[in-house]
Image (cartoon, rainbow, N blue to C red):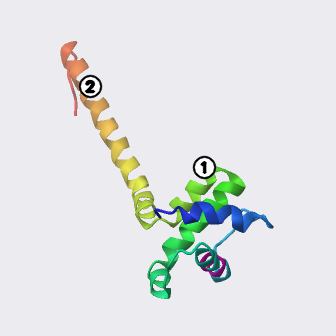
Amino acid sequence: MYKDVFFQFAPVYLANRTVGENFEVTDAVLGEFKQYLTSQNIPWTHADVDGVKDWLKARIKENIVTIQFGEARGLQSLAEWDPEIQKALRFLPEAQALEDHAHKVQMEKADSRNAVNHGVPVHP
């Protein structure tokens, strides 16, 4: 990370090719990344790579997709991989339902206060 190798590898990878919207980092792409690390005298071991293989693929993809399709799409590709973001997205419908219910309760309370302030009997 401190050498920003993902950012540096992406243009090298794209120098002689383009990628499509459904681009995925395969083991072959990961192999090219390892070769790039070696060519840049960046030490790595198979244990380093194997322990974080999915994370590496996500970071490589983010940078390649950013160059090919723009920053928003690159960040989207990273968000699609990120397990924490995916977990949060699963809770969005529930959060929306809670917000809608809270808004409804607030409106009912406001209606009740208005009715009481204007001398109108309130019927539950």
| Residue 12 magenta-highlighted | no
Can you see residue 22? no
Between 84 and 100, the one nearer to me in the picture? 84
Eye-nearest disc, 1 or 2: 1
The quarter of the rendered structure image containing the C terminus is top left
Find disc 2 in the rendering and name its residue.
110
Q: Which residue type carries mark 2? A: Ala
Between 79 and 30, the one nearer to me in the picture? 30
Q: Main secondary structure of the magenta part?
A: helix
Secondary element type, mark 1: helix
Place residue 87 in its image quadrant.
bottom left
Can you see residue 3? yes
Vertical comparison of 2 with 54: above or below: above
Query: Which segment is the magenta one?
Result: 30-34
Image point (22%, 12%), residue name:
118
Find disc 1 in the rendering and name its residue.
72
Q: Which residue type carries mark 1? A: Ala
Q: Earlier in the sequence, mark 1 or mark 2?
A: 1
